Image (cartoon, rainbow, N blue to C red):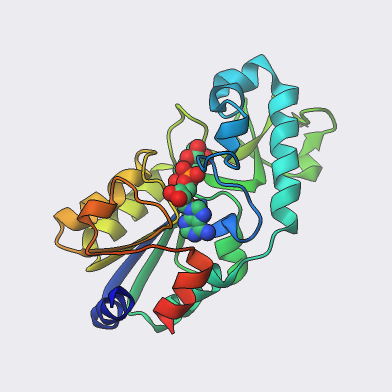
Amino acid sequence: MSLDAARKLIAAATRICVLTGAGISAESGIPTFRDALTGLWSKFRPEDLATPEAFERNPAIVWEWYANRRERVAMAKPNAGHRALVELERRAGRFTLVTQNVDGLHARAGSRNLVELHGNIARTRCFGCNRGLDESTMRPGTPPTCAHCGGYARPDVVWFGEMLSEEALQRGFEAARSCDLFLSIGTSTVVEPAASLPFLALEAGARVIEVNPDRTPLSDQAAIWLQGAAGAVLPDLVR
Ligand code: OAD
């Protein structure tokens, strides 16, 4: 029943906004953050690794932890859920995909109108002068250092307590406010400002479809909650 109803909402939609979280990459072998036992925050304390203060306290430990995650991400492949969203974008009128994920799998799957709200773990920038860095502009070290100012290299991802890119935020808010259908996929809907996007869409009169094996703070207000894994549900939804 709800899959058919969701398919009808998609067929009738003219402007679709999609928000994804770590759940869509779980089936690519990338751990989520808050799933019990397997989530990263059930093994590590975010305040020890994912804050500017943690990096200043232990630059080598934080750099190594992200380098390890970067290697794991580089070996991962987009899954059927990522590919279903590429197909949906190809068929939809106006389509914006806003992701909290830093794994780059949506881009690798072929999504085009993509907003990476929390950055991208494959990119590096300087903690001192904020320049984008690559092999040619870094001196070796753990962490490497910026050839321009000598500052430490850091992953180009948003840490807790840091501002998101203004441009990404504006694009995400604009897409949420102007869509007539909002899909929220694989996110626990607890980290702001991303968690506000589905509620902005509801305020603007959009219908919301949520895809998640578990309930979230959004589930009660979603028009349809498709309880299941993104890699299983999305191909059926988009077919
Ligand atoms: P979470 O780990 O908080 O939530 C993952 C969600 O995905 C949960 O609701 C799971 O039930 C669901 N899930 C698990 N497996 C799934 C599957 N196969 N298909 C669909 N859903 C599945 O991850 P996020 O909500 O993405 O912040 O976390 C948001 C932010 O908190 C992240 O971007 C990161 C983290 O700290 C920063 O990097 C700043």
Q: In which quarter of the image is the N terminus?
A: bottom left
Q: In this view, does 213 lie to the left or right of 102?
A: left
Where residue 156 sits, quadrant-wise, is: top right
Residue 39 percent coordinates (x, y): 57, 41
Whether residue 118 is visible to the viewer of this picture, yes or no, is no
Q: Residue 45, relative to residue 89: is it above or below?
A: above
- Where residue 82 appears, x then y in whole percent? 54, 68
Image location (x, y in percent) of residue 234 = 45, 72
Q: Quadrant of the C terminus?
A: bottom left
Residue at the extreme right of the image, as rendered: 140
Looking at the rendered structure, the number of numbered marks drawn on it comes to: 0
Query: From where the camera sits, is residue 60 visible?
Result: yes
Image point (56%, 33%), residue name: 41
Identify whether 100 is placed above or below 204: above
Indicate the quadrant where residue 93 lies. bottom left
Give the vertical position of 142 relative to 167 (above or below).
above
Which residue does the image show at 75% across and 40% down from the upper left? Answer: 68
In percent of the image, x 43 and y 33: which residue is there? 163
Looking at the picture, does residue 154 appear above or below residue 114? above
- Picture coordinates of residue 162, whole percent (x, y): 46, 30
The answer to whether 139 appears left or right of 204 in the picture is right
